Structure formats: C-alpha cells, structure tokens
Amino acid sequence: MTYRSLERANAYFYDPARRRAVIARHGGVSYLSSGVNHLQTPRVLLDLAARELRERRLIENYTAPGGALGIGAAIAFEMHDRLGRPAFGAIAPANVCLTVGATGALAGAFRYLADTACARNALVLGLNYSFFSTVCDEVGIAYRIARSELRDRLLPTADEACARIAAERPDIVVLSQPSNPSGETYDTGELRRVVDAVAQAGGWLVFDEVPSLAAADEDDLPAPLPDETLATFPPRLIWIGSYSKSRSLAGLRAGYLLAAQPVVDFVRKHNERQSWSPVNAGSSALIADMILRVMARRLRRAQGRDAQRIVTRTAREARHYLELFAPFSDDFARFDGIWRFLDAELDWTAALASYTADLAAVGATCRANWNDFEQRIGPHLAHSIDLQSGFNHCVRLATGMTEWEFVTAAFDQAGADFYTETVFADHDDASSTDFWVRVSCAAEREMFARGIDNLARFLDSGSARR
C-alpha cells in the first residue's frame, strides 16, 4: 500500500482549474467513493450537541489528551453490554483513549508499536485505506497486504489468512471488520482462528471496526477476544473504533482505541505532544449514543418485550457508570458531572424511538442507493463483492480503460470522483484494466442518483471503452 497513488489522484482532482471546469460542466462533483457516512445523524444526537454548545463551555476550554472522561465511561459501559460478563475485567475507562478520528488512533498505535514494541513489519488482511502506508513510512514499519486468491473477494479466507500469518510471522496483523473497501467480514469461528494464528505467531493484532454502519436492527460484529473470562485487556490487541461512519459524525473527528494500559498511556502522551488531543465538543451526544446503543441491543435481544423496563434499567446502569467514572465536569466550568446534563432533558424512551427510526432510515437509504446503482450501472458491472456489513461496495466495471484513464475520464466527463484499487493496494501501478472500484452508498438519494446517472451516460456512450 502506498500513499503516492492518492497524492497523484488528489493532485489531479483538486487542481483548481480542472475542478472549476468539472463543476461548470456537471453542476458539481459526485463523490461516489467517499467512504464517509454523509447521511443524517440521529436527531437526538444533533439536539444534544447543539444544546451542549449553547449551555456548556467546551469551546472556551482546552481539551484533554485522553478525551472527555464521560465518553470513556460510556464506551466501557457499551462494550461490557456487547461482550458480556466475561469481558468486564478487560475493559475499563483506563483502557479507552479518545483520538482525533480513527486516523489519530492509528497513528498513535503504530507509533507505540514501532517505538516501544519494536515492531518492524505489518501484514494487512485485504486491502485498506492508504493512510496506513503513511503511518508505516513515518515510523519505519515495512508494510504488505494479503488479498484472497479467489476472484470474487478481497479479504483472504480464514484458511488463506492463517496460512499467510503462519508462514510470515508478522510483527503486526491489521484487520478491518467490515473490510475497507469491500465490506467483507469473518464470522465468529473464522475470526477466532485468525486471532489464534496471530497469537501463535507472537504478533500484535490491530483490529479496526471503523467502516461499520450500525443499523438499529443489525447484530454486533464478532469481537477479537478469547472465549474465556478476562481479568485484563489482551496485551497484544489494539481495537480501533469511531463515530464517523456508523453515526454520521465525521465532522467531530471522534475516534478511540481500546488497548492495554501501557498502550493507552503512550497514545495519550502522543496526543498531548502532537496537539492531537481529541475535541470534547459534542461529548454529550457521543455518551448518549453509547447508552442508546445498549438500549437498542437489549430490546433487540428481548424481541421488543418489556421495553419500558429495559429502558429504565439501562438508564439507571448508565448513570452508575458515569457518576462513578466521570464524577466531575469535562468543561472545567462546573462541579457536577455529565449525567445530570443528559438525564435532565432526555426522555429516554422517546429518544430511543427517534434514534432507532433515524438509524433505520440511514440503512434503508444505503440499500436503496445500491439497488439504484446495480440497476443503472448493471450492464457495465463485471464483478461485485457481496456486502456483508457497512456501506462500502467493491465492484469491477467493464470499461476497457486502464485504472488511471478511467478515474480521470470519469471525473472530467461525468463529474464522478472515485477511489480505485491503487488507493488501497501496495503498489502504484494504475495501468491495469482489471481493477476494483469502491462505491460508497451513504449519500443522500438525490445526490447519489445524479452521480450514477452521469456515470451511466458516460459508460453508455462508449467513452469508457477503447
């Protein structure tokens, strides 16, 4: 994987004169490969964030290198509910570090792995975003990818992954669930085999859940933890999460990592030194999101029974976590903690109903956009990887053009901006006519429809065939 391919694309797509010409010709640029969830944030979270900015003094204060205490407590609360009692000893607020987006978590984690763990090489399962290569170059870690030998997938099968790990014994294995850009996942058994293979090779596992789309009715993805009861967090696991994709909160740059305390302590110091301390604005919305996730999960498990009792009990348990772990304010302007600010205004039952409805609408929009893409672009689809989770689809288009010819022609002639294979692969060769394209469906219907209409006309015209 290399960042040079993305730099080359940005130099082309962000050339001012070229962009002006494309906008004049097409009325705008359609970001069909954005990879960020641009759909509506749940309204209850927006309302909380707006109220926080009006009533609390977060903008007037510095941020903390570890992030707001209340968010760490809420993440621990949600993870305990997700993973069950065997994991209670593994995750506490001391195992949580907020970062400036998941990129901040990645940068801090790889700096720790290079400087303290003395890691020198990393193996990525499947393709991934090219920011990984930048981080590895900066810290001196050699980087390579393992992709499936099967034509219809990018993430290696569990057999392929375990064989590659056993043969190469990398210092670090990087795995995204769902994978980026293809939305593939391992089931519980497959993930357990991969985790065991990493442990047997003596490596670290960097487990990235950022590309997810947590719909209200979607089950949790498998977790990279052993089955037994844990007294501490696994010492060679770094688990990265973010609010950007699943909750359309990319603008807050709110990422986090879960890790053993030495890793967390290092990343907090790295945050402070690099001025990458995460913002605390919007912390009430992030805390509420974690609480509402627990409520939605428990209702799903109960199949809708005893809804009011579940909501009341969950709010009571969340209060216990927040008052215990975040007893004072994060804005340094008051003595009370965050719980009273949240609970004083929220009707949790109504908030949950609004929250789940909004998340369901996001999922429905992603599915509808993909259906539109398949129908409109169908004659030009050579391959498509079945989506298992998230909203990023991977396709091959029958264009008859090289990768670089396609992305530049699609931009100039259709106003469509794409991320294609070299942005995610470990090479800079964009001369192949057989390449993957990421299609990201988390966009408003009207904007997405305009983009695929322009793309379809471009492909239908024969401009994409040589």
Image (tube, rainbow, N blue to C red):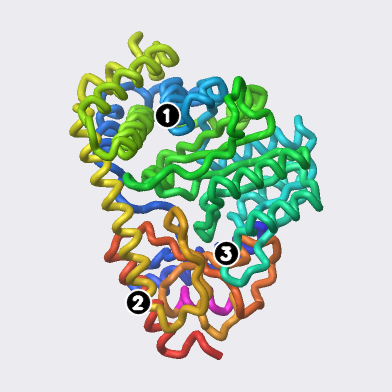
Residue 382 rendering spot, x and y as whole percentages: 51, 79
Instruction: Name the residue type under label 3.
Output: Ala
Distance from disc 3 to disc 1, alpha carbons, whole Å, reads 46 Å
Residue to which mark 1 is pinned: 81
The mark that comes first in sequence, 3 or 1, is: 3
The C terminus lies in quadrant: bottom right
Q: Secondary structure at mark 3?
A: helix
- In this rendering, position of residue 224 left or right of residue 46: right
Instruction: Name the residue type under label 1.
Output: Asp
Where residue 110 sits, quadrant-wise, is: top right
Residue 142 rendering spot, x and y as whole percentages: 77, 50
Q: Determine contact: label 2, label 3, CB under 8 Å.
A: no
Residue 11's tag is: 3
Where residue 376 sits, quadrant-wise, is: bottom left
Disc tally is 3
The mark that comes first in sequence, 2 or 3, is: 3
Residue stretch rendered in magenta on the structure? 404-412
- In this rendering, position of residue 279 left or right of residue 447: right
Residue 338 rendering spot, x and y as whole percentages: 34, 19
Q: Residue at x 61, y 22 (%)?
A: 232
Distance from disc 1 to disc 2, alpha carbons, whole Å, reads 40 Å
Residue 358 rendering spot, x and y as whole percentages: 26, 46
Q: Residue at x 57, y 24 (%)?
A: 90
Disc 1 packing (10 Å; few <14; some 14–19; many ≥20): some
Q: Nearer the viewer, mark 2 or mark 3?
A: 2
Residue to which mark 2 is pinned: 375
Residue 191's tag is: none
The N terminus lies in quadrant: bottom right
Disc 2 packing (10 Å; few <14; some 14–19; many ≥20): few
Q: Nearer the viewer, residue 105 or 123?
A: 123
